[in-house]
Amino acid sequence: MKQKILIVPCSGIGKSYGSVAREAAYRVTEDLCPEKTKLVPLALLVLGGEEARSELGEAKAITIDGCKHACAAKVVAESGGTVANAVDVPEVFRRHRHLKPSGIAELDENGKKLAQVLAEEIRELVGSAVGEDRHA
Amino acid sequence: MPSERTAMPELPKRKVGIIACSGEEIAEGTVTRLAALRVLESLRPHETVTICLPLFLAGGEGDRAFARFHPTIAVDGCEKRCAARGTEMYSGKPAVSIVVNGDRSKDSSLLGTARRLTEVGMQVVDDVAGQIVRHVDQLLDLKRGRQTGPPTAGLEILQERAPRQAACSCGSGIPVATLQVAGREVTLLALPLIFAEFHEAGKLPDESVRNELMQAVKIYNSIPDADEAAYAHAVIQEYVAFCRENH
């Protein structure tokens, strides 16, 4: 069986963009491409060590970050993982300014729509990552 | 005779830090996130602050100083205790560690999924938020007259406050400065603020302020006795440079 693409959202808890990252990750891994992707909790990688490395394995990861600190991308890289794509929620928002999200515990409608836009973009990235493997 | 007072720089207000694992894979992870947010946004908005767990690794020294400055409550969704262990590893030992459903009193499958909690799951969110609030009050020694009541008793009163966004510390960590002390690099918490306070008070960078400066530095930093003279020398040199730059 082909190796799954790992989806690693940031754990952003203080801003709506963090919730958008989390929601988009669920939409990708549960709704859009469950067979090709696997959600990896970032908290587990923070501890580093063998557990994190085995979680990342040889697979490619797509990280989703909600702020400039880019915790997901940095932590995956520091844990020895391969970041195939680093997606930045504010950057996606800048291309869809009419979808300004609000709410953290519960995203508003704009937040959910932005998460869907993001999830669809990530689906394309997953397709490319899988395709690259096929032609390698 | 007037008593000598140590200058206390005006640092960010000391609050209780709440660090949730936010584990995206399991329902208990979502419980940690929602319980933390409930405390931060509604139940104790003025007494609590948060930081994303991964920022300890991805951020700077100011972010890593978070748990050394704020007493913290780690809230984990499983026995791996990523939040508690990660906080201790990179920042400081949490004052309290809570594991959701740690006593297995609820069947995990009844909580719902990571994406959507059931009514039972939301009840666990209430319970965990209540536990966090009790610990916050104990850590800050708040006298609200409800410590003897059930975990959530009296919380409704505070919920009347206007909800707000969770106070997030990312990008606003504790100010730090890095100095060379006896040939090695050390990072001191709050030093820029201490300097600013002394400078504003018109205290000149000479030997007469050395002791007072070091007393202020020691409030926020652990200075080994054996190295105190070397630290004092480095701090006073840095203060000379600070005063020159801000002349």
Image (cartoon, coloured by chain):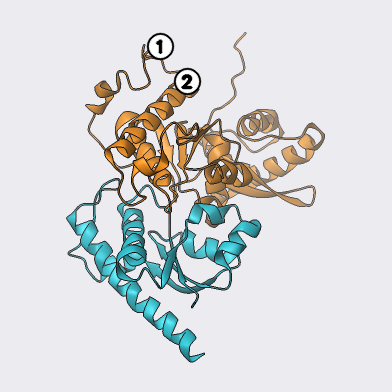
Chain colours: A cyan, B orange
Secondary element under disc 1, as helix, strand or loop, is: loop
Q: Name the residue under label 1.
A: B148
Disc 2: CA contacts within 10 A as few (<14), some (14-19) or many (>=20):
few
Viewed as shown, does residue B207 lie left or right of A116?
Answer: right
Residue B36 versus residue A91 in the image, above or below: above
Disc 1: CA contacts within 10 A as few (<14), some (14-19) or many (>=20):
few
Q: Name the residue under label 2.
A: B138
What is the residue that sits farthest to the top in this orientation? B1
Q: Which mark is residue A34?
A: none
Q: In which quarter of the image is residue B226?
A: top right
Q: Mark 1 lies on which chain?
A: B
Residue A109 versus residue B9 in the image, above or below: below
Q: Which chain carries label 2?
A: B
Whole-percent x, y for residue B55 in the image: 50, 52
Secondary element under disc 2, as helix, strand or loop, is: helix
Amino acid type, label 2: Gln
